[in-house]
Image (cartoon, grey):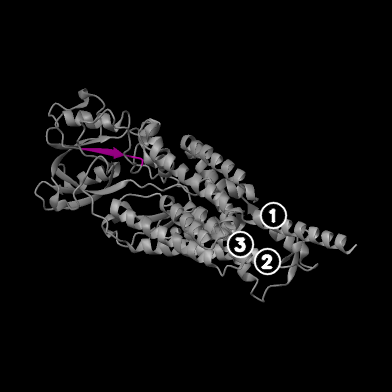
């Protein structure tokens, strides 16, 4: 796959992955002798739940899954006073259901879903007086609850508190810093190869290697960000089709990236150097086996991509290779292009995360809606799910653009499946391009890797700052909001302190101009000396 196909996938690399707030429905029988827990999803900005069922208030459950509760005529004659009402999802807005339940003096609304557990998200601008807790629960859990506990059931909602620090954050930190540092170092080695005089035998191969690199100019950067905006909007409206395109492209791109990474290492292995003819080309046997291995790994990920228990390991390996190959292949020509790229992508994130909620119907940002996928809100499509005869085991496709590490200290929420700490590929690649430029600048100016080292340290500091804000605010953070200022500011300070800002800003263009000026100057000196000699 060519560079254009790889660049198209980069459009999605900085999408945040948004996860619904998860909690527990604690159900007990009428004499409190038997109890069971069930997973729920709720909107933490709408409802605050206690951290344990010991502090929760119990209400008698009223099972109304045979009705919609979309009009006051659906309220049974016995009333809903002081009850936890269970109704079906669909037909009308969940906020309309909650308003009817609250006006009927109900204390809790549970929405039974046959399509998994969606994320409650709607525009509450016209429901300021709505205070009743709203949560989604699986339809199958409600049916099994009565079989296990009888008809007289009391329920309470709670959400176990997350630990202040989870070791998965440390793993994410190590993966991201390692990938950025190694990608930058690899880009520097590539720069050294380009600067090394090539012999006549290596001239053709060296020219081919240079063609593999893609240089971003300032104009290319601006066009790239515009395409990002267009593609994000297309994903917002056509997610259920385009997600499979993204999965296919990632499968191909990650296989090629892994091949490029491992083939660079295989050059130091003295076995398998014999060549065979394939498609009228002479290819080393070890590269054929390596290509087959990389394709097999990528295909395995595609087949088992929704198996949370172990497939995250394969996705992370492919993701690391993908990021490394991008950082090495995409080249920023100068610091000016780096500032434009990182600055525009930062504005891009801020706009689509914080500004677009003012324009969408449900009050959610476009970035959140795309990241959450169709499982984010079943009400969005307006379809009716009550006619499904049994709970369908639907697995919603997710964009494969994150490093995923299971939360190691989140055992209380195992009812809701594995929970992951996530970091988008873009939070590695975008600052990594600046780190790679710093490394190449060190190589060209013999700066003893000072730009590379300090920019990598700045990236590490930005990641730590991201985790600190995450723990303080207890909500997902756009990492670029902290990584971009840290890396750009540090690089600028180093350039100013070394009085190399002009060189650093103009990059290779400055070197070419300087070499041209020197050549012209030398020619003028020779001409003057010749004239004086005559």
Single out the mark in the foreground, 1 or 3.
1
Q: CA distance from mark 3 to mark 2?
A: 20 Å
Tell me: 165 left or right of 459: left
> Is disc 2 surrounded by few (<14), some (14 to 19) or many (20+) residues within 10 Å?
some
Q: From the image, tell me which residue sits under label 3.
A: 259
State whether the magenta stretch is mostly helix, strand or loop.
Answer: strand
Q: From the image, tell me which residue sits under label 2.
A: 193
Q: CA distance from mark 1 to mark 3?
A: 37 Å
Tell me: 494 left or right of 273: left
The residue depicted at 27 percent of the width and 31 percent of the height is: 95
Tell me: 392 left or right of 437: left
Instruction: Kindly state the secondary structure of the residue where label 3 is placed.
Output: helix
Q: From the image, tell me which residue sits under label 1.
A: 513
> Is disc 1 surrounded by few (<14), some (14 to 19) or many (20+) residues within 10 Å?
few
* Residue 151 coordinates in the image, percent (x, y): 16, 42
Instruction: Kindly state the secondary structure of the residue where label 1 is placed.
Output: helix
Single out the mark in the foreground, 2 or 1.
1
Instruction: Kindly state the secondary structure of the residue where label 2 is placed.
Output: helix
* Residue 239 coordinates in the image, percent (x, y): 48, 39
The region drawn magenta spans: 109-115
The quadrant the C terminus occupies is bottom right
> Is disc 3 surrounded by few (<14), some (14 to 19) or many (20+) residues within 10 Å?
many
Quick one: label 1 or label 3, which is nearer the N terminus?
A: 3
* Vertical placement of residue 466 versus 222, above or below: below
């Amino acid at each position: 796959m060519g560079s254009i196909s790889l660049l198209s996938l980069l459009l999605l690399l900085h999408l945040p992955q948004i996860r619904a707030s998860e909690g527990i429905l604690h159900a007990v029988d009428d004499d409190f002798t038997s109890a069971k827990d069930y997973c729920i999803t709720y909107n933490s900005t709408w409802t605050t739940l206690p951290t344990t069922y010991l502090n929760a208030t119990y209400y008698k459950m009223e099972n109304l899954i045979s009705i919609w509760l979309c009009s006051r005529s659906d309220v049974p004659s016995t009333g809903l006073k002081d009850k936890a009402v269970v109704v079906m999802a669909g037909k009308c807005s969940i906020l309309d259901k909650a308003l009817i339940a609250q006006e009927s003096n109900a204390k809790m609304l549970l929405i039974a879903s046959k399509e998994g557990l969606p994320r409650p998200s709607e525009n509450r601008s016209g429901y300021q007086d709505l205070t009743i807790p709203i949560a989604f629960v699986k339809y199958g859990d409600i049916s099994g609850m009565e079989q296990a506990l009888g008809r007289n059931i009391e329920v309470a909602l709670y959400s176990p508190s997350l630990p202040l620090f989870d070791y998965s954050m440390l793993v994410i930190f190590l993966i991201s810093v390692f990938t950025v540092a190694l990608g930058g170092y690899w880009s520097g080695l590539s720069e050294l190869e380009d600067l090394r005089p090539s012999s006549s035998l290596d001239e053709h191969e060296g020219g081919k290697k240079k063609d593999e690199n893609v240089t971003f100019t300032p104009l290319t950067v601006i066009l790239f960000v515009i395409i990002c905006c267009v593609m994000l909007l297309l994903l917002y409206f056509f997610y259920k089709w385009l997600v499979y395109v993204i999965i296919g492209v990632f499968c191909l791109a990650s296989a090629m990236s892994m091949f490029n990474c491992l083939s660079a290492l295989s050059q130091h292995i003295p076995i398998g150097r014999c060549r065979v003819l394939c498609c009228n080309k002479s290819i080393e046997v070890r590269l054929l086996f390596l290509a087959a291995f990389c394709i097999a790994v990528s295909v395995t990920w595609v087949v088992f991509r929704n198996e949370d228990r172990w497939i995250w390991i394969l996705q992370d390996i492919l993701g690391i290779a993908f990021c490394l190959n991008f950082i090495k292949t995409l080249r920023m020509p100068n610091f000016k292009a780096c500032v434009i790229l990182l600055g525009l992508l930062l504005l891009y994130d801020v706009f689509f995360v914080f500004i677009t909620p003012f324009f969408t119907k449900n009050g959610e940002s476009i970035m959140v809606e795309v990241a959450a996928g169709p499982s984010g809100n079943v009400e969005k499509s307006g379809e009716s799910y009550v006619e499904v005869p049994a709970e369908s085991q639907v697995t919603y496709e997710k964009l494969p653009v994150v490093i995923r590490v299971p939360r190691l200290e989140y055992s209380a929420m195992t009812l809701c499946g594995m929970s992951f700490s996530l970091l988008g590929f873009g939070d590695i690649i975008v600052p990594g391009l600046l780190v790679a430029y710093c490394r190449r600048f060190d190589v060209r100016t013999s700066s003893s890797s000072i730009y590379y080292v300090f920019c990598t340290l700045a990236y590490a500091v930005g990641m730590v700052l991201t985790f600190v804000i995450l723990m303080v605010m207890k909500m997902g953070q756009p990492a670029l909001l902290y990584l971009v200022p840290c890396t750009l500011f540090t690089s600028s300070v180093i350039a100013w302190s070394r009085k190399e800002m002009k060189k650093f800003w103009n990059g290779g263009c400055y070197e070419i101009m300087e070499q041209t000026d020197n050549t012209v100057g030398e020619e003028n000196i020779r001409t003057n000396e010749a004239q004086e000699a005559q």
